[in-house]
Amino acid sequence: MNEQRCACAHCSCTVDVNAVQQEGKAYCCEACASGHRNGEPCRMSGCDCAEASRPVEDDDSAV
């Protein structure tokens, strides 16, 4: 059986039969499927995709 990766851009988890399906893509958990909208962590401990998914904030005060 081929392992399928989570569709979250920064996630390295694989999905299984319990994958969250959204817009034709499979995600390992609801947090990944929502794009970590509220900063929710990935269901897998040790996966930092939520951190990597956060937008980089510009620091305009240094200009």
Image: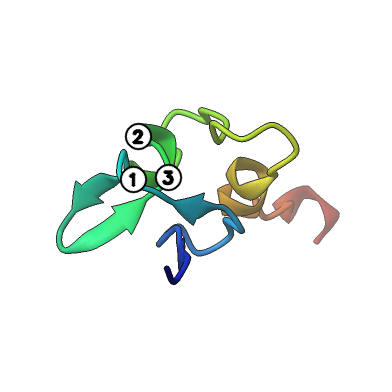
What is the distance, in whole Å, between disc 1 and disc 3 at their CAs? Answer: 8 Å
Image-quadrant location for residue 62: bottom right
Q: Is residue 4 left or right of residue 21?
A: right
Residue type marked 3: Cys
Residue type marked 1: Ala
Image-quadrant location for residue 7: bottom left
Front one among 57 and 17: 17
The residue depicted at 55 percent of the width and 36 percent of the height is: 42
Mark number displayed over residue 33:
1
What is the distance, in whole Å, between disc 2 and disc 3 at their CAs? Answer: 7 Å
Outermost residue on the bottom side: it is 2
Image-quadrant location for residue 1: bottom left
Mark number displayed over residue 28:
3
Give the secondary structure at mark 3: loop
Mark nearer the viewer, 1 or 3: 3
- Disc 2 vs disc 3: Cβ atoms closer than 8 Å? no
- Disc 1 vs disc 2: Cβ atoms closer than 8 Å? yes
First along the sequence among labels 1 and 3: 3
Residue 15 is situated, as x and y percent measured from the top left of the image, at: 42, 52
Asked if 57 appears above or below 42 in the picture, the reply is below
Asked if 41 appears above or below 54 in the picture, the reply is above
Mark number displayed over residue 30:
2
Please rate how many residues cluster around mark 2, counting C-alpha atoms within 10 Å: few if below 14, some from 14 to 19, many from 20.
some
What is the distance, in whole Å, between disc 1 and disc 2 at their CAs? Answer: 5 Å
Residue 53 is situated, as x and y percent measured from the top left of the image, at: 56, 51
Residue 38 is situated, as x and y percent measured from the top left of the image, at: 44, 28
